Image (cartoon, rainbow, N blue to C red):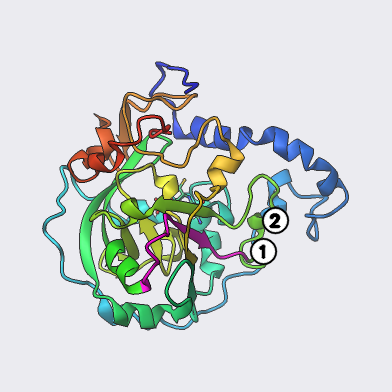
Amino acid sequence: MLIRRIPSWALPESAATPEHVAMNRRRFMAAGAGLAAGAFAAPGAAQAGLFDIFKSKTPAAPQPPDPSVGLYPAKRNDAYRLDRDMTPESVNLGYNNFYEFGTGKGDPAENAQALRIRPWTLKIGGMVETPREVGIDDLLKALPLEERLYRHRCVEAWSMALPWTGMPMKDFVAWAKPLGSARYVVMKTFLDTEVAPYQASPLYEWPYTEGLTIEEATNELAFLATGAYGKPLARQMGAPIRLAAPWKYGFKSVKSIVSIDFVEKRPRTLWEAAGPREYGFWANVNPEVSHPRWSQAQERILGTNDRRPTLLYNGYAEQVAGLYSGLKGEKLFM
Ligand code: MTE
C-alpha cells in the first residue's frame, strides 16, 4: 500500500477538506469542457464563484411534520457505552459532511433543509427472495428501534460521540431475506439535482454509493440509524435513514439511503472512484496506517479541545477484528 507517513497529524480541518476536493482537480479539469459548454451551468453562473453554481437555488419550502416523531426516544441498549462525553447536538447539527449539499462543514445544515423526506421509499433488490419497495414509516413499524451510543470517526481525523436511534442492520438483513449466495450489501443515496445541485458536479460519481460485506452488515455493530439525540434524524445527518458503522471511517456511513441491494460483486464506491490511492472499500480505522496526506494516529474530538490517540477499529476491535482474519491481502485500513 502506498502510504506516506506524515508527522503533521495536527492537520487542521480547513486544510484537510479542500484537499479532499483538490484530489479531484484533474478530474474536474477534464470535465472543464463540459462546464464550458454549459452542461452544469445554472442561471447566474457566469457571475458566481466556481462552486456557487452547485448551491441550492430552491429555498427550503415548509415541510410537513415528521410522522415518526412519536417513536423517539427509543429504549437505550446499554451494551454500547462511551469512553467520553457525548458530542452536543448543536455541534453535530452544524458540522457535517454531506457533499450533495456542499463541501463546507456548515453547508448541509442550510442546504439539506430542501430535502423532502416524506414520502420516502427504500428499494430492496438484487439477490433477495422477493425484491420490494417499502415506505420508511412501514419499515419503522416492521423493525424495533433502539438507541445506541457510538463513537464516530471521520477519515479527516475528527471525531464525535453520539446517541443514534435505529435498527441493528442484521435485523434488517434478516427481514430483507437475501439469498445465500449474496456476498455484499450496496447502499445508495437519492439522486436529485433539483434539491441537491452539487450532484451535478463532475468531481464525483453520483449517487453516493457504499457497501459492506454480508458478514460486516450482519455484525452486531452495523446499524441503520433513523434518529439521533432522541429524535428523527435531522436532514443534514442523513434523514430519514443512514448507516452507522462505527469501526470504519465515516465516509462508509452513507446518508439518506434510497436503495439497498444484495449482490455478488464488490461495488465501486464513490470515494474509491474519486481517489483510489486514498480511499478504499474497507476503510477500517487504524492509528498505524496513515492517510497518504496525514496521520491517523490521533483524533480531534469536536466540541472540545481534546485530542486522543486513535484506537484500532475505533475501539471496537473486540466486536469486529474477527471479520478480517482471513483477509490479510486486502487493504483493510484505507
Ligand atoms: N453520505 C452521503 N450521501 N454524502 C456524503 O457526502 N459523507 C460521509 C458520510 N456519509 C457523506 C455521506 C462522510 S465523509 C462522513 S465523515 C459522514 O457521512 C459524516 O456524517 P455526519 O455529518 O453525520 O457527521
Residue at figure coordinates x 56%, y 65% from the top left: 190
Q: Is residue 178 magenta?
A: yes
Marks 1 and 2: in contact by CB < 8 Å?
A: yes
- Residue of label 1: 193
Q: Position of residue 121 (x, y in %)?
A: 49, 77
The residues colored magenta run: 176-191
> 72 or 224: which is nearer to us?
224
Q: Secondary structure at mark 1?
A: loop
On the rendered structure, is 183 left or right of 227? Answer: right
Can residue 300 be seen here? The reply is: yes
- Give amino acid for label 2: Ala
Which quadrant holds residue 40?
bottom right
State which tag comes first along the sequence, 2 or 1.
Answer: 1
Q: Which quarter of the rendered picture does the C terminus lie within?
A: top left
Q: Is residue 302 visible?
A: no
In the picture shown, does residue 61 fall above or below 225?
below
Describe the element under mark 2 as helix, strand or loop: helix
What amino acid is at disc 1? Thr
Residue at left offset 47%, top offset 83%? 64
Q: CA distance from mark 2 to mark 1?
A: 6 Å
* Few, some or many residues within 10 Å of mark 1 (<14, 14–19, 20+): some
Instruction: Give the percent coordinates (x, y) of residue 249.
Output: 38, 42
Horizontal placement of 333 versus 105: left or right? Answer: left
What is the x, y in percent for residue 325? 27, 36
Marker disc for residue 249: none
Q: Residue at x 15, y 42 (%)?
A: 83
Disc 1 residue lies near ligand 1 with CB under 8 A: no
